[in-house]
Amino acid sequence: MQELLDFTTGISVAVMLAVLFSIRRQHIRVEYSVSWFGAAAALLLLSRWPAGLQALSSWLGIGDPPLALVMIVGCLFLVVLFRLSVIISDLKDANIALTQRVAILEYRLESAHGPQGTQG
């Protein structure tokens, strides 16, 4: 079990560092990185606190703490991915609305100036 906890600690630290470097290089916006950083912090906490993991696994009714850790990690990252899917859906809707507004403005400009090909 200790090997799994050490591996999980390494993964959580790697995710935290990747998020911090991505923020620094402006590859990810801060508001989107909070959920990734929170999930990695929860993973780090569980991997370094075996008594808490044992209590959580018994509370969940899972006899094996490493299995509980894997289940919790999966659920955490599922929540993060769901949150990002909601954000992407909102951005797509906003993009469609913006494209429609630009098309309407182009149509109004063309109709206000008349056909372009008849000068001459």
Image (cartoon, rainbow, N blue to C red):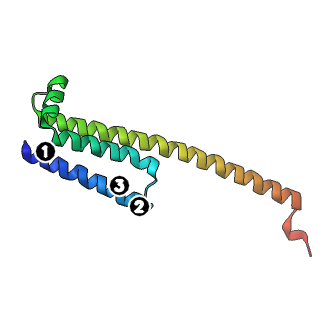
SS category of the residue bearing label 3: helix
Q: Position of residue 35 (x, y in %)?
A: 38, 43
Q: CA distance from mark 1 to mark 3?
A: 21 Å
What residue is at 36 percent from the left and 41 percent from the top?
80
Please give left or right for residue 65 compared with residue 36 in the image. Answer: left
Which residue is denoted by mark 1 in the rendering? 5
Which residue is denoted by mark 3 in the rendering? 19
Residues at discs 1 and 3 in contact (Cβ within 8 Å): no
What residue is at 51 percent from the left and 43 percent from the top?
89
Type of amino acid at the residue the image marks with label 3: Val
Q: CA distance from mark 2 to mark 1?
A: 29 Å
Q: Position of residue 19 (x, y in %)?
A: 35, 54
Which residue is denoted by mark 2 in the rendering? 24
Please give left or right for residue 5 compared with residue 43 in the image. Answer: left
- Is the N terminus in the top left, top right, bottom left or bottom right quadrant? top left
Instruction: Please tell me in which quadrant of the rendered image residue 106 appears.
Output: bottom right
